[in-house]
Amino acid sequence: MIERIRSLQLRHHYKVWNDIWRSPLPVDVKRTIRQMYLQAVILRKHDAPTRSLDAAGYTIRYCTHNHFLLLFQEIFLDHSYHFVTSSRTPRIVDCGSNIGMAVVYFKLLFPDSQILAFEPDHDAFGCLVANIENNDIHSVTPANLALAETDGEVDFFFSEHTPGSLTSGIVRQRSSVQCRKVRAVRLSDHVDGEVDFLKIDVEGSELGIVRDLCLTGKIRYVSQMAIEYHHHINADEDTFSTILGHLENAGFGYQIGTRHMRRPLAQRKFQDIFLYAYRK
């Protein structure tokens, strides 16, 4: 049985290794991701006291090893935030940056990009800043702020037992263990020019961000965006068509994806829905 498990693991690693090489990325970026995969996944050590990983010339600080692996899978292996642009210095806005894994990915693709990274969680933000400074990443502005439809203080829900949790946010139903006050701002006040790529992963407050951009007209500056839409955080609310309507009215086309779910589908179940939107 042990040998069979090892065989399956080796097959999986071999498949991922080849998938990385077939991805639509520059050769040097593929090599870097392969080295990261080798160190982070194949040779991983569970939660060392330093909570950091040295791979491919990068030192990545994280809150928990499991969350780091989830982020690595989503960003570096699934390429959830890959985009194409003719600009050599694209402007990127990262809403819900967590520890900054997407920042590292964007900088691999576009070394001269300018990135504004929002993250309200104290623990995740500490890792974000460390990952920017320790890896000498330039032209990134980290902001320890939540995003909402109005400025001011908002409740931020988190778990002290899971620092930097991927479900922490300002929506109670997503993570309602502990609560603290954090400062919130409107994204529209921080968009004053072209945005080549907008990433939104904010655990339930994505509709408010998009609505704010549309109502203020700032959506016109955005060329492409990736939104993780959290469907049925409140099981009795169905607002997916609302965010699609905002995108359509603003002149965006979109593609929709979702993680695999068991069939048959049941009523009122939570779903992570991935939206890639592009100006037509």
Image (spheres, grey):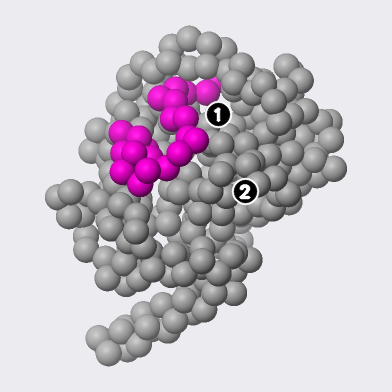
Q: Amino acid at mark 2?
A: Phe
Identify the secondary structure beneath mark 2: strand
Pinpoint residue 18: horizontal percent, then vertical percent: 52, 78
Image point 28% across, 58% down: which residue?
Answer: 54
Please rate how many residues cluster around mark 2, counting C-alpha atoms within 10 Å: few if below 14, some from 14 to 19, many from 20: some
Residue 70 vs residue 74: left or right? Answer: left
Which one is in front, 83 or 229?
83
Quarter-wise, where is residue 11 in the image?
bottom left
Q: Is residue 205 above or below residue 278?
A: above
Kindly tell me whether residue 165 is visible in this rendering: no
Identify the secondary structure beneath mark 1: loop
Q: Answer whether residue 180 is magenta in the image.
A: no
**Please, which residue is most extreme toward the left here?**
49
Pinpoint residue 222: horizontal percent, then vertical percent: 72, 34
The residue to which callout 1 is attached is 205
Which one is in front, 119 or 155?
119
Pinpoint residue 74: horizontal percent, then vertical percent: 49, 56
**Please, which residue is most extreme toward the top here?**
152
Pinpoint residue 130: horizontal percent, then vertical percent: 31, 39
Q: Tell me where the magenta segment starts and ends, as one range.
A: 126-149
The residue to which callout 2 is attached is 274
Image point 55% across, 20% down: which residue?
Answer: 148
* Distance of label 1 from label 2 (alpha carbons): 14 Å
